[in-house]
Image (cartoon, grey):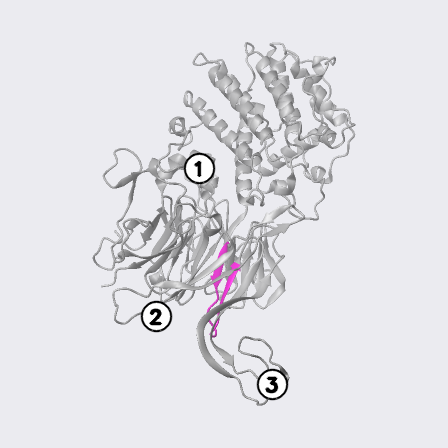
Amino acid sequence: FLGAGGGNDIQWCFSQVKGAVDDDVAEADIISTVEFNHSGELLATGDKGGRVVIFQQEQENKTQSHSRGEYNVYSTFQSHEPEFDYLKSLEIEEKINKIRWLPQKNAAQFLLSTNDKTIKLWKISERDKRPEGYNLKEEDGRYRDPTTVTTLRVPVFRPMDLMVEASPRRIFANAHTYHINSISINSDYETYLSADDLRINLWHLEITDRSFNIVDIKPANMEELTEVITAAEFHPNSCSTFVYSSSKGTIRLCDMRASALCDRHSKLFEEPEDPSNRSFFSEIISSISDVKFSHSGRYMMTRDYLSVKIWDLNMENRPVETYQVHEYLRSKLCSLYENDCIFDKFECCWNGSDRQVEFFSLIVMTGSYNNFFRMFDRNTKRDITLEASRENNKPRTVLKPRKVCASGKRKKDEISVDSLDFNKKILHTAWHPKENIIAVATTNNLYIFQDKMN
Amino acid sequence: MLGKGGKRKFDEHEDGLEGKVVSPTDGPSKVSYTLQRQTIFNISLMKLYNHRPLTEPSLQKTVLINNMLRRIQEELKQEGSLRPMFVAASQPADPLSDNFREAQPAFSHLASPPLLPTDFVSTMPLESCLTPASLLEDDTFCTSPAVQHEGPTKPPPPALQPVKDSFSSALDEIEELCPAPTSAEAVAAESAADDSKAQPSESNIHKPEGLPESRTAESKLMDPLPGNFEITASTGFLTDLTLDDILFADIDTSMYDFDPCTSATGAASKMAPVSADELLKTLAPYSSQPVTPNQPFKMDLTELDHIMEVLVGS
């Protein structure tokens, strides 16, 4: 039982919560993506209003060894604005679908953020000095009367209050007819892919007026369309390999060296349907909402509506492990279809690791309803359910495990399925790349949990 | 939206219906299977057509819902070809025609000119009820390129035939009109075939001056149908085709085809070439059961009306 103590089990404690307290959620504040940068020092969130908020971890205070640095707001900027497609008379949402950080090359930080149609490369840089002592300008910027200039001086840099600036460096637009669901930076750090419902494009980070189409599953006749692309990711080590998942529960692995248009997959991962579980909703719940490679790239993880599956890239006909996230929902699928919850796209993530070695891809985290999130330990096969809630959360108090009672007698402290709040869904979670710090997004709040250090 | 702890209104009767699929061949549980299927069908229709977003609807969601509808439709068609879903002789035709009366004005906004509900004077012999396709095929309105392209297996239009007394020949006709699909392409081709058959009435909607063949065909339903078993069987499917045209012919395809270069006259997307009366057909066999004979039927008619009203009223 993760968190139960003993051995190397992680005990999760509440650390911080960001966002508005009131229950009335402003639509623009709905968090739509969460992502740590490569060092873990920065944590970015995107929301439905098109804004990006970046938090920075405080440098560890050596005297306070009981907790790692807190995350505080570092930069906030408007990444995307709503647009109007005049041809179709429809709005293009400014909601940020995904954020992906580039590895840091110099003092500045770079990230890619995307909405349904346009990807932008943002540069986030610090400014803590400014030049003073211009000859022709006053300190406030007004121009001096040239006749009053009697001496020359050299302007010097003087320290100023830290200012963090975000500026868009590249805008990759007009390459997607359908809604972008994924972006993934290649291990060469020069190219990246963007995937929409029917196509995947390859970009060079420096070139905005051209992208190459590498996957196209649009049928000649749109009435024959029965399957869409739901997620795509580059392999962490092999710069010519990527995978994409579909609404029918399949994952295709493609090699860009095979041909310019990767319409023929190198591998097709698909688990045969379990006939005892067949229902009207079998296809819908098999639709994959997220795919993530493990650190070494030997495995990949997929999330469908009810489960998380771990696949060995060498075995296409079935996953090596399957974890049930909320199996108790299987008998409620009709209601969940009616209220659209069955279409919720849950993401999943691996634990962090400071080694790019398979041995360390041990724990899987994913969200559920009622502000619950789940973790699965691949080694011990134990799992835990935790809740992101402002109640009962004091810093450094270990989170209490939760349990949902599927049927029958409800034990004390258990929650019955019918009491679950399906409006409180955790779709986005992120794990610090090196430490046991996790960021969990509820509808409009961001929770940060750490393991209890001692 | 679900409130915390709120009971869903479907909960009570769904607990018994949800979860594992009941094989359609089981006896007593067949009703619950059919009821579940119908519920899901209703919900799916509402989702596709009730939604008027400011932004583009999610293509993934649309595709999944459409797949659901197609699957149910395929099941219904297969069941129809195996075991005819005819209205029992005792079943009054009036509820059917009543429903169609109401259905027409509900969709009048889709067609221009508005369809006249019950103003038809039917003088054509009953025989022509059996061969709607030939009437439709006679119409010379041109089909849109996309529709022609997608119909690789257009069934030949059935010739005008005298009223058949034998059930098997009626069945043959039904099969001719609606071949059992064996693959996704066949399903698409079938919808395409429906499309092409429906073409004249679809063109009707675009060209008001055309003779509304489909309407005349449909007007036959307004007449009190004889309790004749076979005829009602085939007219049921006939209605299927004609209502289809009116219901779905004018569907905005922008949900499917985002290419600005695509012709605006592109195929009317037959996203769900199953009309509401398919639901009625599925329920018809059960309406004559001793146990609550007419309740489920009436209840579903009400539901049907409700759906129509919602689809129009929104």
Instruction: Output the chain of dot 3.
Output: A
Q: Residues within 10 Å of mark 3 (few under 14, many from 20)?
A: few
Q: CA distance from mark 1 to mark 3?
A: 70 Å
Above or below residue B27? Residue A54 is below
Q: Which residues are magenta?
A: A97-113
Residue occupying the far left of the picture: A6
For marks 3 and 2 on the same chain, the one whose residue lies earlier in the sequence: 2
Q: CA distance from mark 1 to mark 2?
A: 43 Å
State the residue at coordinates (41%, 42%): A423
**Quadrant where the C terminus of chain B lies?**
top right
Per the image, the residue denoted by label 3 is A148
Above or below residue B86? Residue B274 is below
Element type where label 3 sits in the image: helix
Give amino acid for label 3: Thr
Instruction: Output the chain of dot 1.
Output: B
- Horizontal relation, residue A89 to residue A249: left or right: right
Per the image, the residue denoted by label 1 is B1
Q: Horizontal and vertical percent for residue B288?
A: 49, 13
Classify residue A369 by image quadrant: top left
Q: Residues within 10 Å of mark 2 (few under 14, many from 20)?
A: few
Residue A59: assigned label: 2
Q: CA distance from mark 3 to mark 2?
A: 48 Å
Nearer to us in this view, A359 or A191: A191
Q: Horizontal and vertical percent for residue B132?
A: 70, 22
Give amino acid for label 2: Gln
Above or below residue B102? Residue B72 is below
Element type where label 1 sits in the image: loop
